[in-house]
Amino acid sequence: MAKTLAPLPEPWPEDIAAMLARYPTSDGYILSLFRTFAQSKRFLQKGVPNLLDRESPLPLRVREIVILRVTANFGCGYEWGVHVAIFAKAAKFTEAQVAGTVQPGGEAPLWAPEEARLIAAVDRLCTRGALDAELKAAFEADWTTEQQLEILALCGAYHTVSLVANLAGLPHEDFVPADIRAMAPVPA
């Protein structure tokens, strides 16, 4: 029996198919990532919370800055590419901002000051798991406690997603255009 982390091939057992049916699809297609989650019923059910709902205390743009930055920090071209392809336009990112999500620092000309501070906070959370006093003060000034918890949850969830996608070696989804694939971060 193979122990390689990879998307679970069809046909799926009835209980797995029912769980996968709760995940988002595009014309019935289930992302490779979700099919990889299906290697474990427990993980498929509980592993990564879906924070991409309308009840989020964060605007879509802020949520996507966090996700793109986390996936870039962990070299997860697969998930970074999925989010750029699906959400960059709705988040109103410029081409330079999309490229900027994989470059060091949150350069002020590309980002509003609050966004640049968010990028710095996400970078620090990804590398240290904590914020220094100055960055913590800015983080608390910029975001409500509910938003702070959401940002932390996104960092944790997309760190896990990055680990799964990278270890499984998931290739870009077919709907991710070549220009996005060319910019995508790669694992170190």
Image: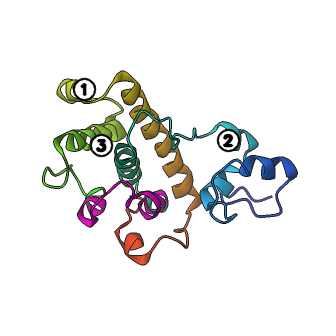
The answer to whether residue 39 of the structure is visible from this angle is no
Circle 3 sits in a helix, a strand or a loop, which is it?
helix
| Residue at the (76%, 64%) spot, across then down | 9
Horizontally, is 92 left or right of 156 in the view? left
Q: Position of residue 114 (x, y in %)?
A: 21, 39
Residue located beneath label 2 in the image: 43
Front position in the image: 187 or 113 = 113
Mark 1 Cα shell of 10 Å, populated few (<14), some (14-19), many (≥20):
some
Circle 2 sits in a helix, a strand or a loop, which is it?
helix
Residue ranking furthest to the left:
109
Quarter assignment of residue 124: top left
Of helix, strand and loop, which mostly describes the magenta segment? helix
In the rendered structure, which segment of residues is drawn in magenta?
A: 79-99
The answer to whether residue 58 of the structure is visible from this angle is yes
Type of amino acid under label 2: Phe
The image shows residue 103, relative to residue 132, as above or below, that is below
| Residue at the (48%, 70%) spot, across then down | 176
Mark 2 Cα shell of 10 Å, populated few (<14), some (14-19), many (≥20):
few
Circle 1 sits in a helix, a strand or a loop, which is it?
helix
Q: Position of residue 36 (x, y in %)?
A: 66, 55
Quarter that holds the N terminus: bottom right
Type of amino acid under label 1: Lys
Residue located beneath label 1 in the image: 136
Residue located beneath label 3 in the image: 123
Horizontally, is 70 left or right of 157 in the view? left
Horizontally, is 51 left or right of 151 in the view? right
| Residue at the (46%, 44%) spot, across then down | 159
Horizontally, is 10 left or right of 163 in the view? right
Q: Position of residue 168 (x, y in %)?
A: 59, 59
The CA distance from mark 1 to mark 2 is 32 Å
Q: Is residue 88 magenta?
A: yes
